Image (cartoon, grey):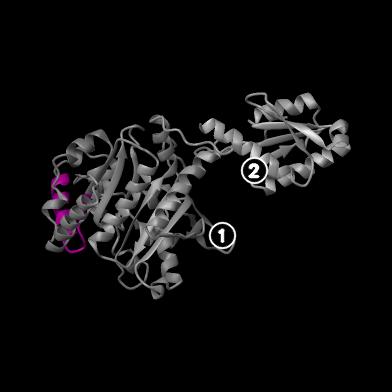
Amino acid sequence: MGVITKKIKGTEDVLPKESYRWQFVENIMREEAANFGFKEMRTPVFEHTELFARGVGATTDVVQKEMYTFDTKGGESVTLRPEGTAGAARAVLEHALPNEGLPIKAYYLTSCYRYEKPQAGRLREFHQFGVEEYGTSSPIADAEVISLASSIFKRLQIKDLHLEINSIGCPCCRPKFNEALKEYFSAHKEELCGNCLNRLEKNPMRLIDCKVPSCHEIAKDAPSILDFLCDECREHFELVKKYLKTAGIEYKVNPTIVRGLDYYTKTVFEFVSDAIGSQGTVCGGGRYDGLIEELGGQHMPSLGYAMGIERLLMVMDNQGIEIPKPASCALYIAGLGESAQLKAYELVNSVRKSGLPAEGDVVGRGLRAQMKYADKIGAKFSMVLGDNELAEKKAKVKNMTTGELTELELDENFAVKFASLHMAAEFEIVE
């Protein structure tokens, strides 16, 4: 009988043999976030649809085309989160986190869902590491969150990542820019794709980053937002660049970066890799000073970013970056017969309590099959218990690499003596 179903298109399984890679990356993200003063936030996988319509933007591709939205039995419209920021902002408001002091610095490791054509580096269920900082308008905060992302990439030894930054202005200066864009792109209406024709009136700034070749070519000569910035936005952007320079972070100003979500204002940025083709952005974010207000709160300048974990792992694979494998089984104990199996189980547990990974048979294999399994799981040492070993209260531990045998007594100090043997072997490997 075949499997009754398979995984849904656009999703992937993370199997036990590869989950250590995810854990390694996630642990570094947690450690670096903590170094910068960020604490973890976890929000529900689904929210009221209105949250994303208001927060992400009703005219965005995410809201119009990509969300997984459904009605509950109670008649509520809910949506699987397509990104992490809107839910985090909702939590900040609902739990009155500003009362605990500003700035609020949070990070998340979460799954997100978007209905779009699956391709390399872009799945329908994908995972993000993101940071959120609420309650600061300082350009130092912009440089700080970018520095956090940069420090993660350095810890992961990722090379050839390019930081590109831009300012997309604020509600004061952006209207003039939008008018200039409408005027420019209206002269090319006949050449625009259907999506860009829809965006022309509602969200003209999105025409700048259209990936359709004909639209992309037209956008090359479009007006630049940098020519329309108000004094405040221009000064903010110049200070962000100064602080990035102080932090030793190289960047390139790219006026075509606008990001895909409506809540962005002022600083926007992307870390881009050339190692994974067209889906090269592994981290993107910026400032969203009006988001909290849009969701019903008082004005609270905010910023953050999201980092795609699948894309990050793709970059590391393509660059040949080796992720350390977790510690394998230190000792496998094979028990022959009921009494020996009971003793083996006792000793396995004692070794585990000493802090070393140990295993024994739980399937009912014969000795040959048990030794084959010990080799398959990479056990560093093995030991066989039978009637003779039980009678003599001692057994020989075999180094699976060198074949060397060491006799140990099967007493209450067995785990301590084995730990010393294991440590000596590890020391020899390092030497």
- Residue 397, percent across and down? 72, 32
Q: Residue flagged by tag 1: what amino acid is it? A: Thr
Tell whether label 2 touches label 1 (CB within 8 Å).
no
- Location of the N terminus by quadrant is top right
Left or right of 197 in this view: 400: right
The residue pinned by badge 1 equals 72
Q: Residues within 10 Å of mark 1 (few under 14, many from 20)?
A: few
State the mark number for residue 356. 2
State the mark number for residue 345. none
Left or right of 377 in this view: 249: left
- Residue 214, percent across and down? 22, 34
Nearer to me, 156 or 119 = 156
Nearer to me, 13 or 20 = 20
Report if residue 147 is visible in the image.
yes
Magenta: main secondary structure: helix
- Residue 277, percent across and down? 34, 32
| Label 2 SS | loop
Q: Residue flagged by tag 2: what amino acid is it? A: Leu
- Examine the structure image and report whether residue 178 is included in the region drawn in magenta: yes
Alpha carbons under labels 1 and 2: distance apart:
48 Å
- Nearer-N-terminus badge (1/2): 1
Where is 360 relative to 291, above or below?
above
Report if residue 13 is visible in the image.
no
Q: Residues within 10 Å of mark 2 (few under 14, many from 20)?
A: some
Segment tinted magenta in the rendering = 166-186
Residue at the image position 33 percent from the left and 73 percent from the top: 298
Farthest bottom residue?
99
| Label 1 SS | loop
